[in-house]
Amino acid sequence: MNVGLPEAIAAEQGIVLYVDGVTVSFDGFKALNNLSYTVRTGEMYAVIGPNGAGKTTMMDVVTGKTRPDSGQVYFKQVHDLTRLDEAAIANLGIGRKFQKPTVFENHTVMENLELALKSKRGPFASLFFRLTPERADRIDEVLTTIGLTGQRQAMAGTLSHGQKQWLEIGMLLIQEPELLFLDEPVAGMTDAETEQTSELLRQIAGKHSVVVVEHDMAFVRALDVKVTVLHEGSVLAEGSLDHVQNDEKVIEVYLGR
Amino acid sequence: MTAASRPSGYVPLLMRLDRGGMVLLSVLAAAAIAVPALNLLMPPDSPFHVPTYLVSLWGKYLCFALLAVSVDLVWGYCGILSLGHGAFFALGGYAMGMHLMRQIGDRGVYGDPILPDFMVFLDWDQLPWYWHGFDSFAFAALMVLLVPGTLAFVFGWLAFRSRVTGVYFSIISQAMTYALLLAFFRNDMGFGGNNGLTDFKDILGFDLQADGTRAALFVASAIALAGGYLICRLMVTSKFGRVLMAIRDGESRTRFLGYRVEMYKLLVWTVSAMMAGVAGALYVPQVGIINPGEFSPANSIEIIVWVAVGGRGTLYGAALGGVLVNYGKTYFTGAAPEIWLFLLGGLFIAVTLLLPKGIVGTLSQWWQGRRGFGLRKRARPAVPASEGGAAE
Ligand SMILES: Nc1ncnc2c1ncn2[C@@H]1O[C@H](COP(=O)(O)OP(=O)(O)OP(=O)(O)O)[C@@H](O)[C@H]1O
Ligand SMILES: [Mg+2]
């Protein structure tokens, strides 16, 4: 089923996501311009870039929300993501946290996790779904990880902003995806919450491949991972945070201002 | 972790009922026993006697209540605002009407043993193919489910797969019932045109004018409403229902969790249409006629008013709204027919502005306010004030 994927890449092990030459335009404006990058299994990446650089659009392409005009997007070397819809991509094991926290506000914390819990997704499977002890344990486990055990029965809408972000991260974890995309997970958080979140993400790293989009430089530094700088829809620089921060082009378009 | 604080895997049916649902089922059970008893056993001059016309009138209200519950299932829980549910109701009604027509046999005005009067009148010499089989009650009963169900499935398949939502969906659902209205008005469609189907004689061999038959139809309507309510309640209290509400509050978010939203919508939409069909099928023998007027867009819009008045997203509130508004309609169309439409419009505006959660939503809010505790856990709004709790 190796349709169209270059032999060299197909042969190379350890690549979980392969994006090549992706262009997305909205009414002639190129939100993504010939973007290429790869994500290796079990590694964490940070993506930074000025507003409108195309960071969210890049996630939209990988998760099936937006179809690219051209380019290739392969998951685990065999799944052509440009042909699949959101649900199919999610079920392959790609999870996403949105820029604005998007939990189900009229469901309890517990129900939000139950919805996200890895299980059969069909309507009939849901009709006959039972919260077995194993499933309940799994939910408890994640509640502990995200520190919301005390809020289990609270409506998600009553949570604080930071708690909603954590709940959403918990919903990602409980889906057991292989590849996670986090869009600005600490936006609007207090310093203490930001600190807890980077702790949380460090726990996650290793078990999953993670791509974190973030503006908060202190947070990116705390993550201590490889950084990709996006600008006008393509990669401007890649490397350690120190490396990209000293890059002339990056200083000019982003950090210098 | 105590057993009580953790939901167990299996939740018995009774535990899935809320207070309103228990009241609804108790009232229905009491009515199903008391109304026929007071109608059949009390002498007509007794003050406790319930006249037969009232039995059928209330039986009709129960059918409307079932129709309202079916709309609440899709609108209140999945956010699908159908402005065409009257079509499914009417199709169920026509399926039953066709059976009742065939039951007339040679007792029609023209005495034709096979052809209904209107076909003889049109000089048709044989039964159209789609009338075959309707002489059997079992076949007709199956069609009561299958015809609205199939239409809903095909319509929903096309609409949900192309992600038609919100007001666009409402408009095409309205167009669907309008197209059927025009089609059923035509004589050559073979459904009695303008006049529809009427002059029914009996059902399952029982005289439709007999008190006993009327009482039995009332009981059947009560059972259908209770059954429909329970089916909906089972659906919405399962994880399936929580996915429906997730779709209502954040459709796109639900997709990113891996749910095929269109499959959920298709299932709940089809089940709802079949329930509406059953309501129509029980309605027709009690009112004695089905005509194309039932397809009129205004009818479908009225159902939305019933649900909004009763309380969207509670099921029992919809049933209450269906009965109350129609009771009001009967009263006012008798007392002052010319003002009914204004009243209905005024009622809708008043409820939207003053009681956005409908009668039961307002009552339960008041009740919880009085108790003043246990709010946090219980206060799940039937329908969020602002939709899009999880929209991005
Ligand atoms: N659906 C759309 N229609 C039209 N333009 C769009 C659409 N989505 C994104 N854009 C445009 O594409 C560009 C990239 O947007 P994107 O949201 O990917 O930026 P971003 O890097 O996530 O920015 P931010 O840091 O502000 O979140 C922006 O100029 C945006 O206005
Ligand atoms: Mg963004």
Image (cartoon, rainbow, N blue to C red):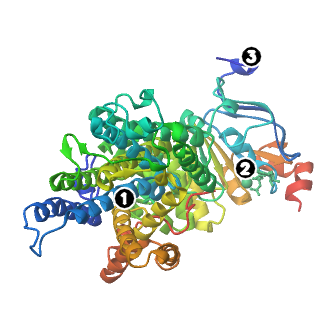
Instruction: Return the residue nearer the eye: B18 or B202.
Output: B202
Q: Residues under labels 1 and 3: Cα distance?
A: 64 Å
Residue denoted by label 1: B64
Residue A56, label in figure: 2
Cβ at disc 2 under 8 Å from ligand 2: yes
Position of B68 with respect to B19 (left or right) is: right
x, y percent for residue B93? 38, 46
Cβ at disc 1 under 8 Å from ligand 1: no
User: Mark 2 or mark 3: which comes first in sequence?
Assistant: 3
In this view, B94 is above or below B65: above
Q: Residues within 10 Å of mark 1 (few under 14, many from 20)?
A: many
Labels 2 & 1 near each other (Cβ < 8 A) = no
Are dots 1 and 3 on a single chain? no
Labels 2, 3: front one: 2
Residue denoted by label 3: A7
Can residue A93 be seen in this snapshot?
Answer: yes
x, y percent for residue B339? 49, 77
Quadrant where the C terminus of chain B is found in the figure:
bottom right
Three-letter amino acid code at the position of disc 3 = Glu
Residue at (46% x, 53% y) in the render: B294
Labels 1, 3: front one: 1
Position of A233 with respect to B121 (left or right) is: right
Instruction: Return the residue nearer the eye: A149 or B340.
Output: B340
Instruction: Return the residue nearer the eye: B26 or A88.
Output: B26
User: Dot 2 lies on which element?
Assistant: helix
* Chain where mark 1 sits: B
Labels 2 & 3 near each other (Cβ < 8 A) = no
| Quadrant where ligand 2 appears | bottom right
Can residue B343 be seen in this snapshot?
Answer: no
Residue at (14% x, 63% y) in the render: B39
* Chain where mark 2 sits: A
